[in-house]
Image: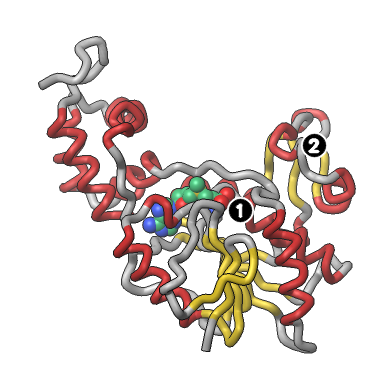
């Protein structure tokens, strides 16, 4: 059955099902029925750039070319983010950093779905504000499965419209305004970049290159794409990476079951590791 004859390429139920299955296997992302059109418009770009004639051909290509999987994943991730999204988390982060700071030991934060970088840079700005320094005792690991968004994140260059809601003092302190050809853009100060290590990491992979004893994990607005068993499996692996009494920050719709004893709710979608 062809879903819509108006479309440039035939796209039927079997194509959608096959793509759903592949992205679930590769990234744990569960695509609901409502994503049919979204899948078409995202994957069709891959067909065009590879000069392929059908979704079936593309699926065959995906099976034969291991490198294509990365681009396939990039095409299907949803990367919506913003500076200081869920701003209450950053007020709390400042308190956490103050509470957990020990002389001579950097605080370690893992931002586990960093997308285009607004979240790790908001963490870095919060750290600079908290310690009133451009070199606060903080190390941030920012990871994402999507290699394309990580490139944007590393560059730290954004359209001014992306920072329109950022506090004016923060903008003055941490963002450089583009001039001439770069008019309309802002660049994050290099000192903030230096606080962050960007790394591609698929949360579904059996091994993560993340050292334990983390003070805070930001894992926001990514668990929603996974099914319940995957969410629990990931939590069971993340919590042991936290130091004693370390914090786990979830997205607004990612409340963790009260029955999950390893974490205790201590704020609005903020949890603390339990002994
Ligand atoms: C909606 S964004 C959330 C960004 C940010 N954490 C925030 O709350 O603003 C979700 C991010 O999760 C990433 N993601 C999806 N599946 C992933 C996986 N299996 N491993 C790591 N990151 C994944 C996507 O690439 C995307 O950048």
Say which residue appears at 84% left-offset and 63% top-offset: 129
Say which residue appears at 20% left-offset and 47% top-offset: 21
The residue that label 1 is drawn on is 154
Q: Residues within 10 Å of mark 1 (few under 14, many from 20)?
A: some
Say which residue appears at 81% left-offset and 64% top-offset: 128
Residue 48 position, x and y percent, is: 31, 25
Element on which disc 2 rests = loop
**Which residue is at the front of the view, 188 or 30?**
30
**Number of numbered labels in the structure image:** 2
Residue 79 position, x and y percent, is: 50, 44
Of all residues, the one furthest to the front in this rendering is 258
Q: Is mark 1 within 8 Å of ligand 1?
A: no
**Which residue is at the front of the view, 236 or 49?**
236
Say which residue appears at 43% left-offset and 57% top-offset: 223
Left/right of residue 266 with respect to residue 127 in the rendered view: left
Residue 143 is at least partly visible in this image: no
Left/right of residue 9 with respect to residue 96 in the rendered view: left
269 in relation to 253, above or below = below
Residue 167 is at least partly visible in this image: yes
Of all residues, the one furthest to the left in this rendering is 1
**Which residue is at the front of the view, 214 or 58?**
214
Residue 245 position, x and y percent, is: 61, 83
Q: Is mark 2 within 8 Å of ligand 1?
A: no
239 in relation to 2, above or below = below
Element on which disc 1 rests = helix
What's the mark number on residue 178?
Answer: 2
Mark closer to the chain start, 1 or 2: 1
């Amino acid at each position: 059955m062809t879903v819509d004859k108006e479309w440039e390429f035939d796209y039927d139920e079997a194509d959608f099902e096959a793509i759903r299955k592949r992205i679930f296997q590769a990234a744990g992302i569960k695509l609901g029925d409502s994503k049919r059109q979204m899948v078409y418009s995202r994957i069709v770009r891959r067909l065009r750039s590879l000069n392929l004639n059908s979704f079936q051909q593309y699926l065959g290509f995906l099976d034969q070319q291991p490198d294509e999987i990365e681009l396939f994943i990039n095409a299907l991730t949803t990367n919506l983010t913003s500076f200081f999204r869920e701003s209450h988390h950053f007020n709390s982060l400042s308190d956490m950093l103050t509470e957990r700071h020990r002389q001579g030991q950097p605080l370690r934060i893992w931002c586990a779905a960093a997308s285009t970088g607004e979240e790790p840079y908001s963490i870095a700005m919060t750290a600079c504000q908290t310690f009133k320094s451009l070199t606060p005792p903080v190390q941030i690991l920012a990871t994402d499965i999507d290699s394309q968004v990580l490139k944007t994140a590393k560059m730290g260059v954004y359209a001014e419209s992306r920072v329109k809601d950022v506090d004016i003092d923060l903008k003055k302190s941490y963002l450089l305004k583009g001039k001439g050809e770069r008019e309309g853009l802002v660049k994050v100060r290099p000192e903030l970049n230096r606080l962050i290590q960007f790394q591609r990491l698929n949360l579904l992979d059996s091994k993560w290159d993340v050292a334990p004893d983390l003070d805070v994990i930001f894992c926001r607005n990514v668990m929603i794409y996974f099914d319940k068993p995957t969410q629990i499996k990931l939590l069971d692996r993340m919590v042991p990476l936290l130091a004693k009494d370390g914090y786990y920050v979830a997205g607004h719709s990612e409340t963790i079951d009260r029955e999950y004893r390893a974490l205790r709710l201590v704020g609005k979608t903020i949890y603390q590791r339990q002994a």
